Structure formats: structure tokens, C-alpha cells
Image (tube, helix red, strand yellow):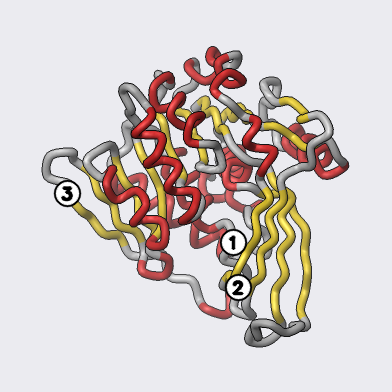
């Protein structure tokens, strides 16, 4: 399947405490750097699952932007529609995790993504509308999301990213003339920001260890729950990225997949990702063999 993914590509800095995290104190632990961003992670996962991925983003004009660009090429992504933002730093996300892998806080510096405007995407409309599916994350500004809601002819999948950024999707609906999307993914913390949109499209609500809830059917708002795939506590290495893998698995199943088929495969992807120290498990391809 040909999938176009639009959004952020970050340098991720993950700091994990050796013992229970103590706020307002220095905690011994481990610090790792990797390439991330919700959209980039989804694109990476989809590439591992064998999809033909076109990634659209702005790379920073620094060593990190160059390295992330090279990694996307190495993964086989089509980045011909990307650009390097002149004199702008690459987006960066800093995550602080407790000893069990749970994130206790994070800071996202995503200003460069704000340069992805409706006018900039208009020049890339052919790539967007000749895809079998389009994915966008809420690192994009509300005006840019509104343009996608109006202009995207392919099935559109939205990721809420975080509580503060999820509100951009609701704002985009107010700005759009004729908004439409296929599916949206968010978690409990983000739900209140987009709950008003539950009469539109299909809603995948990640419940962490409690699995997944799906709301569909614009008239009756049918709800279905799916349990999480069991992962032994001692095998959990990192919780950052499981939600991105969940959504990538759902998208990989295609717009015509049933809720149960998409949910089951997405939950398998999330479970495997929990067992990796990286936000994207390089063994994800094993699920399609």
C-alpha cells in the first residue's frame, strides 16, 4: 500500500531513571538518543511492515536534521517532497522515564514543524492525493490540519500526539469548510480535546495496559473494546513509541479493514514495541512474515 505520512521528525533524547524517579532531584540513570517524532515513527513502522511510504516533513538545518534525513533514505522512504528549513534547528523531544519505562514528563521543541503550511503542502498535493492513505500528526498547526481535512482526497488518518496538541484537531474542524477523515487515534489524556468529534470517522482510543476502545458509526457511535496483548512486566523496555506502532499497525491494514482486524494487528505491533529499548522495534517486520 502507498502511504503518505506528514508531520514531525525529531531527535529524541530519552532519560531513564535507575530507580523510582524523584522529582526536583538529580536521578542516576541512562540517557539515549534516537530518531523519532510521531509522524516519523509511524512512517518508520510502516516501512518495516512493507508499505511504500512517502514522508513529508521539514528537516532542521543542523547535524541532527542531516542524520535523520539519511536514516529515512536508508529505510527506503520517499522523501523527495521534504525540504531542509534554512537556519532552523531540527525538532527535538526530551522524555524522562521512570525505572519501569513509564514517561513522567517530556519537553517538545517543534517550532520548525510550524513551517509546514497549507501553501507548502499545496505544492505537494499530487503526492498526497495519489496515496492509498494519508497520515498526519497534530504537530502540524490547526490551519494546516484544516487544509488536509478539506483537500485530502485519500483516506485521512490523524494522530492526536498529546493533550495540548490534540486541541489543534478540534480547532481545525472549526476552520475547515467540509472536514472529513477516516480514523483518529488518541489516548485517555487526549480524549477530552477531541471527544466532540466522535460523530465523525472512526476513533481508536488507546487505553495502555487496558487495551483499545474503538468508537465508530456516526449515528449510533458503536463502541467496541479490545484487550491488550499480554507482555510480561520484566520484558517491557520502553513505553515511548507503543502508541505510534499501534496506529501504524491499524493503518497498515488499510482503509477497508474491519475494526477487529485493524485493532488486533495494531495491538500486536504495540506489544512488540514495548519489548524494544527503541521507540521503533526493528523486529516489527516479523509480524508480516
Q: Quadrant of the C terminus?
A: top right
Label annotation for residue 101: 2
Q: Is residue 285 visible?
A: no
Task: Spot the residue most to the right.
Answer: 63
Which residue is identified by label 1?
A: 240
Mark 2 and mark 3: Cα distance apart in space = 33 Å
The CA distance from mark 3 to mark 1 is: 29 Å
Dot 1 or dot 2, earlier in sequence: 2
Q: Earlier in the sequence, mark 2 or mark 3?
A: 2
In the image, is 55 to the left or to the right of 4?
right
Secondary structure of the residue carrying tag 2 is loop
Identified at 52% across, 41% down, the residue is 137
- Residue 5's x, y, as percent? 55, 32
> Are the residues tagged 3 and 1 within 8 Å (C-beta)?
no
Residue 160 in the figure: left or right of residue 180: right
68 displayed left or right of 163: right
Q: Residue at x 46, y 38 (%)?
A: 252
Q: Which residue occupies 51% across, 44% down? A: 288
Mark 1 and 2 residues: CB-CB less than 8 Å, in contact? yes
Taking the image as shown, residue 107 lies to the left or right of residue 229, namely: right
> Quadrant location of residue 253?
top left
Q: Tell me which numbered mark, 3 or 1, is placed earlier along the sequence.
A: 3
Q: Which residue is mark 3?
A: 222
Q: Residue 3 in the image: state x and y as whole percent.
A: 52, 28
How packed mark 3 is, by other alpha carbons closer than 10 Å (few <14, some 14-19, many 20 or more), is few
Amino acid at each position: 500500500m502507498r502511504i503518505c505520512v506528514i508531520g514531525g521528525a525529531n531527535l529524541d533524547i530519552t532519560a531513564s531513571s535507575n530507580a523510582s524517579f524523584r522529582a526536583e532531584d538529580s536521578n542516576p540513570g541512562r540517557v539515549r538518543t534516537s530518531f523519532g517524532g510521531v509522524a516519523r515513527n509511524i512512517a518508520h513502522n510502516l516501512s518495516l511492515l512493507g508499505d511504500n511510504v512517502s514522508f513529508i516533513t521539514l528537516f532542521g538545518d543542523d547535524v541532527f536534521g542531516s542524520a535523520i534525513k539519511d536514516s529515512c533514505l536508508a529505510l527506503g522512504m520517499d522523501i523527495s517532497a521534504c525540504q531542509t528549513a534554512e537556519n532552523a534547528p531540527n525538532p527535538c523531544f526530551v522524555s524522562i522515564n521512570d525505572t519501569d519505562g513509564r514517561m513522567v514528563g517530556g519537553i517538545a521543541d517543534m517550532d520548525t514543524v510550524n513551517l509546514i503550511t497549507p501553501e507548502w503542502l499545496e505544492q505537494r498535493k499530487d503526492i498526497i492525493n495519489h496515496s492509498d492513505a494519508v497520515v498526519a500528526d497534530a504537530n502540524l498547526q490547526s490551519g494546516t490540519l484544516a487544509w488536509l481535512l478539506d483537500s485530502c482526497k485519500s483516506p485521512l488518518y490523524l494522530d492526536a500526539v498529546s493533550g495540548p496538541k490534540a486541541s489543534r484537531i478540534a480547532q481545525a474542524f472549526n476552520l475547515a469548510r467540509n472536514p472529513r477523515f477516516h480514523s483518529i487515534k488518541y489516548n485517555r489524556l487526549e480524549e477530552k480535546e477531541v471527544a466532540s468529534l466522535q460523530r465523525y470517522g472512526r476513533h481508536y482510543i488507546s487505553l495502555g495496559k487496558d487495551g483499545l476502545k474503538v468508537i465508530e458509526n456516526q449515528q449510533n457511535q458503536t463502541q467496541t473494546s479490545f484487550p491488550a496483548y499480554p507482555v510480561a512486566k520484566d520484558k517491557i523496555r520502553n513505553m515511548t513509541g507503543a502508541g505510534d506502532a499501534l496506529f501504524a499497525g491499524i493503518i497498515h491494514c488499510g482503509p477497508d479493514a474491519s475494526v477487529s482486524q485493524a485493532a488486533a494487528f495494531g495491538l500486536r505491533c504495540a506489544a512488540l514495541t514495548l519489548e524494544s529499548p527503541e521507540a521503533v522495534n526493528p523486529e516489527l517486520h516479523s509480524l508480516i512474515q
